[in-house]
Image (cartoon, rainbow, N blue to C red):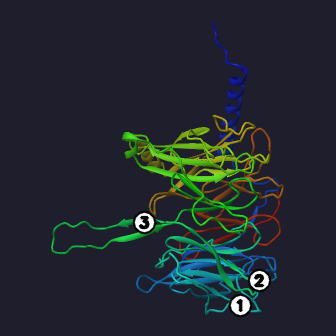
Amino acid sequence: MTNYPSDKRLVNRIRLMQYSILALMCFFIVVKNTEGAELFSSQSLSIDGMILSTISSDLDEKGSAEIIVLSKTGIYPKEKRWISLYRTEKSEQYLNPAWQRWELDHAATMFEVGDIASSPGKEIFYLTDSGIHYYPQGKDGTYSKKSHKLLDFPTITVSPVISYLPRSNLLGDWKGNNRKMFLVPQFNTFAFFDRDSSGEWRKTDTVSVTPRTFLFSDNEDDGGAFRDYSIRAEFRLPRIFIMDFNGDYLQDLILTEQESLTVYLQKADGKFSGEPSFKIVFPVRPSGKESDVNLFYLTTPVDLNGDKYVDVILTLTKGTGKFLEQEIIIYIFLNKQNLESPFTKKPDQTITANGVTPGVNIADVDSDGNADLYFTKIKLGFWKIVQNLISKRVTLDTSIYLLQNDSRYPDDPDFLLKTDYKINLTHKIRFQGTWPTIKSDFNKDGLIDLLVARDDKIEIFLNTLSENLFSKPFVQSGVVTSPFMQITDLNNDGFNDLIFYEKKRNGELSVLLNKGIW
């Protein structure tokens, strides 16, 4: 007697076959748009030195965004960091070389852009061990090369790293009241600064936060005549989120670190609780022999089902016990709307996959108001790595899970895309391009699209809200793709543009302006 699958199983198999066929089509088909024209206009900007980071912002608040590039020249002990500004005049092409360029203060540890002073437009400011400094902008849009001190306040950033300068992200609407405030990390506290009626920045409240401390010693004592007793210390702050945790319409401060979540509730007077309102350590850490394998945790708070309460996605990457093989475990914890016990000890859902992922991403892919889940993974293993090195290519798997009406994700992904990347062996071992990204609308139809940048071309899969989610890719070749990418609307036309740059490449930044010909 032949056993036939149930209707549901049969439908799932058919859907899986459809998605597999679509993935193969996306893998092999390379097409231009219907008119055969390029999707983006391309421009290369010359950069003097190694690019550290970039920011795009409408500095003079006239509509189009300027590009701020942080770069480094020289070698130790004569290293210097530079700020270079690129802007447009009468056309969408950026002036090249830089419109302005000056040396950054050696003491800078982080930098950002924002309206923080009485000078016109936005200021470029940076953090040091003793406070916040900024470069003011003149009436003609030109910046002073001499910085001014805004806040005299000790911070956790003891010493700058010349080869690295991250964005600070310290200026934001931390209280959800449409007022920009500074969040300044110290060794044991986060301090909040707000403007008073006179425009002066003053400390309003603090919360108790203890950073994790790591000690390193590069050399062991071998008993020889020359002994190295040096020890390096590293302070690592938790990830910071501002969300309404408990559904009271007040923004709360949420910190995550490994498998823990700490919440500081905002009080009626607008201040955060000085001490944690509660801290949760999710019981997902393996015990026994499994605790000896390499473990990586990433806890992300998010309102998955739109009930105004914060849920948690916790991602664990661990070894399987086989050589170089890794396993991804995604735990879903739904908020039970009970402050005494907001989460159960057992996860509401668990998703597993083989491989390594940089993290789980959340996006409303099907535009239904729910938080869908996607992640990209690389399968590892001894023979897999050997194959990749021989072929000089690696395959990335992107899985998309749509949240169902019961606040659960399906057991199998709703959409699966396989993308093949070249491996660059000139500097370590890495693939040539960026991770597949689903977070931006490129054709201005209100739906987020899938972007794949690889092998000197970009592929954009437009969202169709159909059974297969995405259309065949629109492709533009001859693009210098790199691991570092920004998606932003540079010329304020409503279409998202792209910036690519390579931190190890001297003097190359690619700007791609969306032509809107979809």
Q: Please tell me which residue lies in front, 248 or 457.
A: 248
Amino acid type of the residue that numbered disc 3 sits on in the rendered structure:
Thr
Residue positioned 78% across, 54% down in the render:
33
Disc 1: which residue: 142
Does residue 148 lie above or below 330 as drawn?
below
SS under mark 1: loop
Q: Which mark is residue 213?
A: 3
Q: CA distance from mark 3 to mark 2?
A: 41 Å
Q: Nearer the viewer, mark 3 or mark 2?
A: 3
Disc 2: which residue: 60
Q: Is residue 493 left or right of residue 292?
A: right
SS under mark 3: strand
- Counting residues from the start of the chain, the first of labels 2 and 1 encountered is 2
Assess whether mark 2 and mark 3 are in contact (beta carbons under 8 angstroms). Answer: no
The quarter of the displayed image where residue 2 is located: top right
Residue positioned 54% across, 40% down in the render:
353
Q: Position of residue 243 (x, y in %)?
A: 69, 59
Q: CA distance from mark 2 to mark 1?
A: 9 Å
Amino acid type of the residue that numbered disc 2 sits on in the rendered structure:
Asp
Does residue 362 lie above or below 50 as drawn?
above
Query: In this view of the protein, can residue 380 be seen by the observer?
Result: no
Amino acid type of the residue that numbered disc 1 sits on in the rendered structure:
Thr
Residue positioned 81% across, 80% down in the render:
62
Q: Position of residue 360 (x, y in %)?
A: 60, 50
Total label count?
3
Query: Callout 1: 10 Å neighbours few (<14), some, many (20+)?
Result: few
